[in-house]
Amino acid sequence: MSLLYHVASHQGTLVVILVIWFGLFLYLVRLDRRIAELEESTSASSRVPPGSAGPRGE
Amino acid sequence: VSKKRASRGLALWKYLVGAWITAVVLAAFLYVRQAQGFAPGTSRIMLFHVPMAMMSVIAFWTSMVYAIHALRKRETVADMKSEYAAELGLLFGILATVTGSIFAAGNWNSFWNWDPRETSMLVLLMIYGAYFGLRSAVEDDERRAALSAVYNIFAGVVMPFLVFVVPRIPALESLHPQNIWKSGGMSADYRIVLYSGLLGYLGLFVWLFQLRLRAGLLAQRDETQSLTSGVMVK
């Protein structure tokens, strides 16, 4: 009962902190993936000798 | 294949950091009880504020270590690492100051009290703010790296004095609780959540640092490529 009261009296703050944290975490996961994609495309383009076909055969 | 496996492994520890910090937040609200001698609901702020301040110090020292490395080896990457660690130190320092102000408003009736610890933290943030000012003022890469590394070492030497010595001078009469680190100063539940929080922030620091460095290296590679293609066109 005391734990329920404890949660109820601070649930607003807890929810706000969790929403901020989840938002930040998901943003970081997306950013990480985006950087990994860019790293991959940059390393692929740097492997292609100048003047030859690009990574998509252009 | 091994590179893909490595990146999957890294992704796993990042998800673990996410889960760990979520658990720390939940524990701060559901496991830890109100401490005696504080305004209702404010004592748990300490569980976020103290590890953030500790993380700020760790980040600034990391920055100093890379600055020494940059100065000795004249490596661009070491200079970048030093800058990015200082950025994160500043971020954690600002977060510690903001959470500390919320705690101060609840317990000492004002967001800012010119307490020795508050003031020394402000001075520390200004010192590192000036570090970024210095970096943006010098255009030549090598000169900027050398000057900012020397400044960073100076800031790293001054920091322990501001963080550990000034707030403990008895004549300055700090409002901050003084005996929390001594035995009996903090209950077991507070200690567990506080150190778990520090561990979580350490993981978050490593992740953010890595992201910043990877983005910085990409930008640098892009700049080098555009310069090379510019030379080829000429």
Image: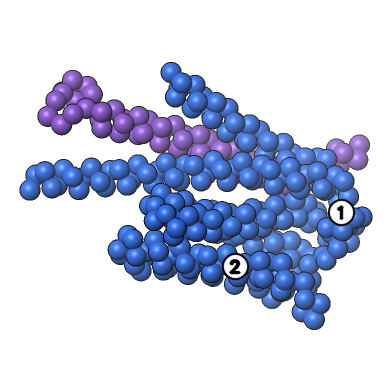
Image-based side of B95 in relation to A32, left or right: right
Q: Taking A43 as reference, is A18 above or below it?
A: below
Q: Is residue B138 left or right of residue B166?
A: left
Instruction: Judge by depth and name the residue closer to the eye, B120 or A26.
Output: B120
Please state the horizontal and vertical placement of residue B198, each as a whole percent of the image.
69, 47
Residue drawn at point x = 44 percent, y = 45 percent: B213
Letter of the chain in blue? B
Residue B122 found in image quarter: bottom right
Q: Secondary structure at mark 2?
A: helix
The residue pinned by badge 2 equals B157
Q: Residue furthest bottom?
A: B171
The hue used for chain A is purple
Q: Is residue B46 above or below residue B216?
A: below
The chain identifier of the residue carrying mark 1 reads B
Extreme-left residue of the structure: B234
What is the three-letter code of the residue carrying label 1?
Met
Q: Position of residue B54 (x, y in %)?
A: 67, 55
Q: Quadrant of the N terminus of chain B?
A: top left
Location of mark 1 (residue): B186
Q: How many marks?
A: 2
Residue at the spot x=37%, y=64% of the render? B144
Callout 2: residue from which chain?
Answer: B
Q: Nearer the viewer, mark 1 or mark 2?
A: 2
**Badge 2 amino acid:** Val
The answer to whether B31 is drawn above or below residue B155 in the figure is: above
Q: Position of residue A41 (x, y in %)?
A: 31, 30
